Amino acid sequence: MRALLLAGLVPALGLAGCATTVEPPPPPLLAWDRADCDASPDLGRTVSLTPKKETAVHVVSTPLGYGSPCLSQEGGAGPYVVYALPTDLDDKTLIVGGLLGYDRIFSPRVRVLDAEGRETRGFVDSDWFSRGPVYSVQFRPRPGDAFVVVSADPSRVGRTESAINVGTNTTVIYTGYGASNWTTGQERHATRVFAYDGEVRVTINDTDTEEDPDR
Amino acid sequence: MKLKLLGLMGALCLSACADPYVATPYDRAASQVDRMVIMDDAMPEKAIAYEVASVGSNFGLIGALVDAGIQAERQDAVNDALREVSFDAEGELETLLMREIGQEGYEVALLPSGARAKRDWLPAHSGAPEGVDAYLDVAVIEYGYMSPGAGQPFRPYVWAKVKLVGAADGSLLMENQIVYNPLNVVEGVITIPPNPEFFFNNRSALLADKARLAAGIEDALQRVAETSAQLLR
């Protein structure tokens, strides 16, 4: 009897020991109160957009939040990141913006700078679309473009976006005679808020991967 | 019928599994387009009324055959209902595109180009009158109503491919895909979530109010036309 009790206790303790608590994500960051922000983008601290080797799709993701470098700009301060464009700009198309997260979207402002830090291109409200899972702008860099600055756009922070997302889900059902798939349709009603935190996503599409990147 | 179903499923997936989709952004200043013509025959002949993960589709070949019959019957009923309220999807989209693109400062006209041999962009663009700078080719691959599966509501659905081609040299000036109410989002494709106002719980609900049935599609086409015009801003 004792042995049986012990045998039951051991897996029970094991289960309890393996159980982990998943911390809920912090609430979206809807206010910015840091005062130690850069007056202009720090071009010495960049994230490279050049892949190790030429590839059709190169994705770079950067989480931004309260602890990230921040930038003082017109409209208010907020976190930012500077991306260094590849030197071989030919045939590149970029999608830059905030990933549609579970409950938030980083409120993005995108500017393109030349090597001296002068703005060569900005984007207006009508340039923004949901392209797949990214609230983004799309552009082809022009000769002379060197950096892409993504900073928080305070004017959009706090605005909510509601969307109905549809999809399917397949479950494998095991029976005594084998396994079969059962597919069901699903709808998810999502509400996301534009925030000072979230994930910035850059996708670089290259339509000619045969080129020499050192050209 | 089986082939048709496979085609539909493939279309709903947007063939996204293969190469990544890369759109071509428009550079209005560099393109110098003032006058454009819209190619004819943008819309498919029939609207869809498709339930993706239906119960029947989970029961092997026999289930799939039964399901194909149910799907086809529903599609016919929806198209009959749309005809009864004289809904003209082609005319509707043309009117919306003309208005929305005209509001962006372009001089725009329709170019009758006959029926498309294939539901896609035209392989070549010609026939524009003197002085036209570009051809706008909007090819709606599918439109109508879609439910993701049994027990889920039908909502309007539109998949459109939009392309602007230079009249002088055939150069590609802009290319994008727009999906209203996509079944799973695809990287790089512009997605528009459905208007929550228009939903129909089942086949009976779809057919109960024909005017509302047409209004749901009209609303989706309006969003697609607005987005097309926005891409040309």
Image: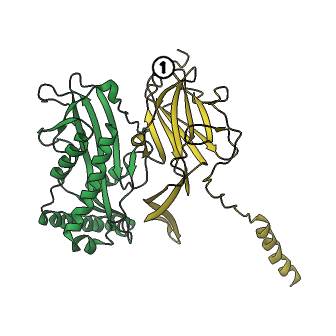
Left or right: where A60 falls relative to B129: right
Nearest the viewer among A106 and B136 is: A106
Quadrant occupied by the N terminus of chain B: bottom left
Task: State the residue position of label 1.
Answer: A211
Q: Residue at x 53, y 26 (%)?
A: A113
Measured as percent of width and height from the top left, residue A99 is found at: 53, 47
**Residue B83, relative to residue B177: is it above or below?**
below
Nearest the viewer among B98 and A72 is: A72
**Residue A17, relative to residue A86: is it above or below?**
below
Nearest the viewer among B156 and B79 is: B156
Q: Which chain is green?
A: B
Q: Which chain is yellow?
A: A
Nearest the viewer among A123 and B216 is: A123
Q: Residue at x 15, y 25 (%)?
A: B131
Residue furthest to the bottom in view is: A1
Quadrant occupied by the C terminus of chain B: top left
